[in-house]
Image (cartoon, grey):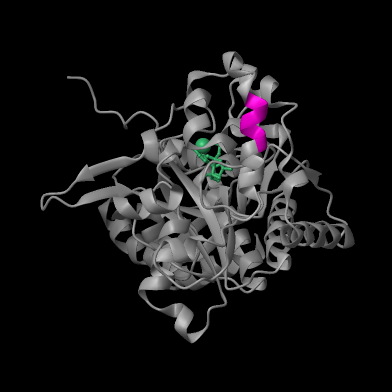
Amino acid sequence: MTSIRAIKGFKDILPGETELWQSIEQTATIVLGAFGFREIRLPILEKTELFARSIGEATDIVEKEMYTFTDRSGDLLTMRPEATAAVVRAYLQHKIYAQDPVQKYYTIGPMFRRERPQKGRYRQFYQINAEIFGVASPYADVQLIVILVELLGRLGVKDAKPHVNSLGCPACRPDFRRALLDFLASREDRLCSDCLRRRETNPLRILDCKVPRCRETSMDAPALEQFLCAECRTHFDTLQQALDELAIPYFIDKRLVRGLDYYSRTTFEIQTAALGAQSAVAGGGRYDGLVQTLGGPDIPATGFAIGFDRLAEIVAADRQATTAVPDVFIAALGAAAQARAFPWLTALNRDGIAADMLFEDKSLKSLMKRAGKLGARHVLIVGENELAQATGQLRNMATRDQVPIALNRAVAELTRHLADGT
Ligand code: ATP
Ligand code: MG
């Protein structure tokens, strides 16, 4: 019988990797906490309509990547492909804006997109999301970029440079859209079939196409920056001045339009060469119209999403895989020794000491072999003789030194010796 494997594009994160994931999550939580963000935890399943309305019908995600199904009562549901829509939904549903529209949230969890699986691209992947509601100022966008730079810096990612752009607003974007369509009119034969379709539905996305010929074609396309209205211009200038003031290097990327419909004004992405083709480790931007689109008041918002899997891959590349090594392995020979030692093991574990033991009647030789395999720093040997003399032997595996342990005070003596490092 063939064994069952995980679904294509879905992967396991195994012990050895999870330690790194935990440490990244801890660092993110600390940094976000210091900047005033609080955690929000949301469902993985939402009504399909939430994503169709927010992300936009003419996007890759909604057109072809969502895991959508009807449940037994006929409701159309979707495994969330991103978090922002759900954060906005919660912000509205609980009328949080009525008490105080200014809120800073973060959330960490899995997202689902039915993309072609490859390195750095999975069908279930994880994101660290941060959102700021109720602040129109570009300083909020800058704050998000600062958090990304700070977090990646603390994690030792060296070449993480923010790319920034402005997408304008509903007042000025149509002018750009027209100019872009004019530019493309004479170059139709050089666009891929997706881009030919995007021309009708979502022409800005052509700038974002990954097909080399499309990229080449759009190289000389007009830049959105030249079409910004006065308010958008000031917004973008202030953002740049603030980044300059903070001495954060950045790159103005006129192609950075991002895949979702709801962005306005600031967009940014953190790219790193460490990732190869899947170069974006985080992306985000301002989405001033989304709260209203989802049925709420006119409240500005801005946010980012970090690709956790990609971040973990970069950080893992310069870190050693971690293993969990017991401080002490109790080699208890025979049923009587096992019965005596099990409460000691439990007491040590409860005290937070990494102690381990094999619950099987094995020879001293195979127990020592087990301790060696685990990399145990010490072994407490308790056999028939030791029980008779009420004294076990604690062996330091590195130095081979042995010290006697009075078995009627085993836990206290072990704790003292382990603390001393003897
Ligand atoms: P890409 O251009 O790489 O497809 P995206 O613009 O679709 O990214 P966002 O929706 O902005 O990505 O999500 C933010 C981050 O989540 C990305 O920068 C990336 O690091 C990560 N990400 C997106 N899709 C995947 C995926 N399928 N597998 C792993 N990580 C992903
Ligand atoms: Mg994508």
Q: For residue 398, say whether it is visible.
A: no
Quadrant of res 183: top right
Q: Residue furthest top?
A: 189
| Residue 271 place in picture, x, y as percent | 69, 40
The reply to whether the magenta stretch includes residue 49 is: no
Q: Where is residue 336 drawn, in percent x and y? A: 27, 57
Residue at x 61%, y 60% (from the top left corner): 28
Point out residue 149 in the picture as x, y percentages from the top left corner.
73, 54
Q: Quadrant of the N terminus?
A: top left
Residue placed farthest to the left in the image? 73
> Mostly what secondary structure, the magenta segment?
helix
Name, please, the residue furthest toward the bottom.
Answer: 99
- Which residue is at the front of the view, 327 or 91? 91
Is the C terminus in the top left, top right, bottom left or bottom right quadrant?
bottom right
Residue visible at 62% across and 42% down in the picture: 281
Q: Does residue 180 show up magenta in the picture?
A: yes
Position of residue 318 in the picture relative to residue 42 (left or right): right
* Residue at image coords 43%, 31%: 115
Query: For the magenta stretch, what is the residue range?
Result: 179-184
Is residue 42 shown to the viewer in this render? Answer: yes
Residue 332 vertical position relative to residue 391 in the rendered view, above or below: above
Q: Residue at x 81, y 58 (%)?
A: 237
Provide residue 48's location: percent of width, then percent of height.
30, 50
**306 is higher (above) or lower (below) than 14:** below
